Image (tube, rainbow, N blue to C red):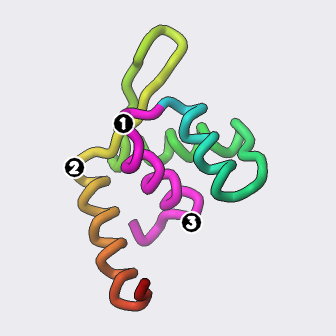
Amino acid sequence: MHDLTGFQRDLLVVIAGLDEPHGLAIKDELEEYYESEVNHGRLYPNLDELVEKGLVEKGQKDRRTNVYHLTQRGDRELSARQEWESQYVTA
């Protein structure tokens, strides 16, 4: 988790918060948060990198649509990050 970019950490948060989201749903959530466009050329390579790192699993909903969800490792890493952040940030 330490070698992820901020964008990749945000991807993990969004994927964790949605029920098996597809790429465009993830893109929409990030665009709302960032208040700017997220290009496909940025989104999909980063999703693929998270898959390669074993943090996200990619499946097929149909022939044109991929869905994403956190692996057990991804869930553990995200929980550990949130716990670490909570030591420094209070609501």
Question: Which label belongs to residue 6?
Answer: 3
Report the number of numbered marks: 3
Mark 3 Cα shell of 10 Å, populated few (<14), some (14-19), many (≥20): few
- Measured Cα–Cα span from mark 2 to mark 1: 15 Å
Give residue 76's quadrant in the image.
bottom left
Q: Is residue 53 visible?
A: no
- Element class at badge 1: loop
- Measured Cα–Cα span from mark 1 to mark 3: 22 Å
- Residue at 37%, 25% (x, y): give it: 59
- Position of 28 with respect to 89 (left or right) is right
Q: Quadrant of the C terminus?
A: bottom left
Q: Earlier in the sequence, mark 2 or mark 1?
A: 1
Mark 2 Cα shell of 10 Å, populated few (<14), some (14-19), many (≥20): few
Q: Residue type at mark 1?
A: Asp
Q: Earlier in the sequence, mark 1 or mark 3?
A: 3
Pointers 1 and 3 in contact (C-beta within 8 Å): no
Is residue 42 shown above or below 90?
A: above
- Element class at badge 3: helix
Residue 61 locus on image (x, y percent): 41, 17
Residue 53 locus on image (x, y percent): 38, 50
Q: Is residue 62 visible?
A: yes
- Residue at 47%, 50% (x, y): give it: 14
Question: Which label belongs to residue 19?
Answer: 1
- Position of 86 with respect to 31 (left or right) is left
- Residue denoted by label 2: 72
Mark 1 Cα shell of 10 Å, populated few (<14), some (14-19), many (≥20): few
Q: Residues in magenta?
A: 1-21
Q: Residue type at mark 3?
A: Gly
